[in-house]
Image (spheres, rainbow, N blue to C red):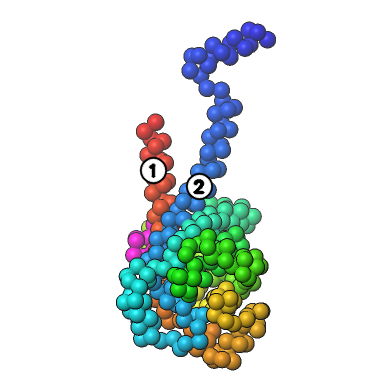
Amino acid sequence: MGSGVQEQRASLAQGEVLPLASSSQSEGLKHTRPVLNSLFSGALAGALAKTAVAPLDRTKIIFQVSSARFSAKEAYRLIYRTYLKDGFFSLWRGNSATMVRVIPYAAIQFCAHEQYKRLLGGYYGFQGKALPPFPRLLAGSMAGTTAAMLTYPLDMVRARMAVTPKEMYSNILHVFVRISREEGLKTLYRGFNPTMLGVIPYAGISFFTYETLKKLHAERSERPHPYLYERLAFGACAGLLGQSASYPLDVVRRRMQTAGVTGHTYGTIFGTMKEIVSEEGLIRGLYKGLSMNWVKGPIAVGISFTTFDLTQILLRKLHQMGHTTR
């Protein structure tokens, strides 16, 4: 036994590496690195996309939660009045809350999508290949619901900050404290059900459309990677279809989230829809601000998908370069 220990020490002194420890370490890194890469790429993608469209997003929310009629002209007037009254950077009011929500949301969503694709690929026998249509749609929906469930209170806070004057809430923590104290902790999950119902078609259709367009492009162009403008176009189409399909539920969740500061009492999804339609009409109520979403949505989703893909490619290349220099 003593001679065996001495031999092991001697081999380590000569610079040999124990094979078991080495293989287990590399195996752990092999599984961890893609997850960390997806989390980082998703976080960056979400932050860039939401910051780019923050003024339009804030304007859309203000119209969604009010009974005022929406038009492009009125939206422009609102943006201009806000700029004159509170300054240029007031157009990004609530964006700090958006970042607190969207960075973990996008990180979780993109990372979950990669993991669900891998799991479904193994289940359906398409490991490492493009998924068939139904699993492709399912992976997107599951990724969206996973992210939304884990980050919902942050979305509630962001909506409140977007529609209230800056004197009402001083920062993100103040929103949490004041809502909890004055309206109860349950209020942080008001609008949760329409959010879950809306994110299933939104995330499913968005990821499905983007992945499908990339697959068709690769088959017809025989190029494995689309150009930058092609990725942006594919993402824009994905955003347009996804947001159009789930938009009425988006209006409902915003009304329910901001009920505490707008003077309304919205209880259920159906009751909220019924009240909106009776007061404002079907199209002008449930689809209020959709035309702005057709501008904002494709830009944001295009930037988001493109940033994620390019960051993933860059990280893989950096990893390969690190291997070749060793």
Q: Quadrant of the C terminus?
A: top left
Where residue 32 appears, x then y in whole percent?
54, 43
Q: Residue at x 38, y 81 (%)?
A: 78
As drawn, 61 above or below 47? below
Q: CA distance from mark 2 to mark 1?
A: 14 Å
Q: Nearer the viewer, residue 298 or 233?
A: 298
Residue depicted at 40% across the width and 61% down the height: 48
- Is residue 137 in view? no
Residue to which mark 2 is pinned: 36
Residue 103 seen in render: yes
Of residue 317 and residue 169, the one placed in the foreground of this image is 169
Residue 246: quarter of image? bottom right
Type of amino acid at the residue the image marks with label 2:
Leu
> Foreground residue, 169 or 237?
169
Residue named by callout 1:
318
What x and y, as percent, mark residue 49?
Answer: 41, 64
**Residue 91 magenta-highlighted:** no
Give the total of numbered labels.
Answer: 2
- Residue 152, by quadrant, is bottom right
Would residue 188 appear left or right of 160 to someone viewing this image?
right
Quadrant (top left, top right, bottom left, bottom right) of the N terminus: top right
Crowdedness of circle 1 by 10 Å Cα count: few (<14), some, many (20+)? few
Secondary structure under tag 1 reads helix
229 part of magenta stretch: yes
Segment colored magenta: 224-232
Pick whichever, 215 or 204, lies toward us. 204
Tell me which corner region of the image, top left, top right, bottom left or bottom right, holds residue 77. bottom left
Query: Measured from the top left, where is residue 322 in percent x and y?
Result: 39, 37
Q: Residue at x 38, y 35 (%)?
A: 324
